Image (tube, helix red, strand yellow):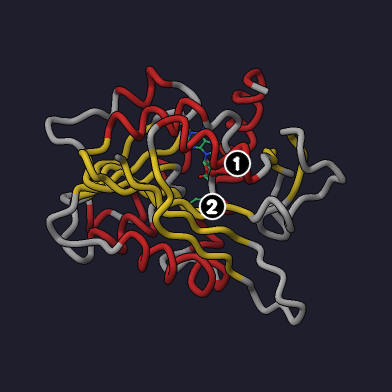
Amino acid sequence: MKNLVKESKDIWNKNATFWDDNMGDNSNEFHRIVIRPKVTELLSPKASDYILDIACGNGNYSAYLADSGISVVAFDYSEKLIELAKKRQEKYLDKIEFCVADATSKESLLNLKRKNKFTKAVCNMAIMDITDIEPLIQTVYELLDDGGIFVFATQHPCFVTLTNKYMTPHQYYGVAIEGQPEKQHYYHRSLQDIFNLCFKTGFVVDGFYEECFKDEKEIPMVIIVRLKKM
Ligand SMILES: C[S@@+](CC[C@H](N)C(=O)[O-])C[C@H]1O[C@@H](n2cnc3c(N)ncnc32)[C@H](O)[C@@H]1O
């Protein structure tokens, strides 16, 4: 699937302004109700933390962290989204360093190495958008301090997929926000593929939630996973 990175990124660049307009300063209800509370509980951010925000979009979660005095390095591969994030989060630029970097490239990720290692990393609703997550999981492990925490929220692969395949990783097209200019790429991976990659790298899972959104049938749309560097 590696050759899909450029096409995925071009779509995110085309959808960037629409995404930023829709997320605004406060993100949408889905992010506010389903993602942020449990991600924040598992991340348990402290003022002394130094946090990597992976695939940061328009930087709303970075701004939320910066508002509590936390220093953040936030990156996205969409140059347009980073440009918009810098504008939107202007008042936090003393706390947030926004960078363009590609999560599928180890070389690009290693450019995010700073004098101090990160105490924590977070990735809100992007694992299912990233073409290849192996370089990301392995490099985040390297960029984190010993005992460091990596929290990610992503689509629940058992319940949210538009195809009838579960076991084999594959790409499909979908829509994140109704009305967006272009359909985007999604990347399905089974739970065992996601978790085994984390275990093989040296992470353990020490926190986990499945979250529903206004669903009478109680079908969880999202998993929220806390990894610890051992
Ligand atoms: C659904 S948005 C989530 C944005 C933000 N984390 C939030 O919660 O508002 C997914 C983001 O993943 C980014 N993304 C996808 N693949 C990426 C990659 N290979 N490297 C960096 N960012 C990527 C997209 O550009 C987009 O900003």
Task: Give how far across and how far down residue 82 sits, in percent.
Answer: 40, 41
Answer with the quarter of the image where residue 189 lies.
top right
Which residue is at the far right?
A: 164
The verdict on label 1 being within 8 Å of ligand 1 is yes
How many numbered discs sit on the rendered protein? 2
Left-right relation of 178 to 129: right
Which residue was labeled with disc 1? 129
- Disc assigned to residue 75: none
Which residue was labeled with disc 2? 125
Which of 92/130 is in front?
130
Instruction: Note whether 159 is above or below 148 in the view shown.
Output: below
Left-right relation of 192 to 114: right
Q: What is the secondary structure assignment of the residue under circle 1?
A: helix
Instruction: Note whether 100 is above or below 106 in the view shown.
Output: below
Quadrant including the N terminus: top right
Q: What is the secondary structure assignment of the residue under circle 2?
A: loop
Q: Which residue appears at 19% of the width and 36% of the height?
A: 117
Task: Give how far across and how far down residue 49 sits, in percent.
Answer: 18, 53
Task: Give how far across and how far down residue 154 sits, in percent.
Answer: 56, 52
Answer with the quarter of the image where residue 108 lies.
top left
Q: Amino acid at mark 1?
A: Asp
Quadrant including the C terminus: top left
Left-right relation of 172 to 109: right
The verdict on label 2 being within 8 Å of ligand 1 is yes
Q: Amino acid at mark 2?
A: Met
What is the crowding at mark 2: few (fewer than 14 residues within 10 Å), some, or many (at least 20)? Answer: many
Task: Check whether the beta carbons of the residues at disc 2 and disc 1 lie within 8 A of each other.
Answer: yes
Instruction: Note whether 92 is above or below 200 in the view shown.
Output: below
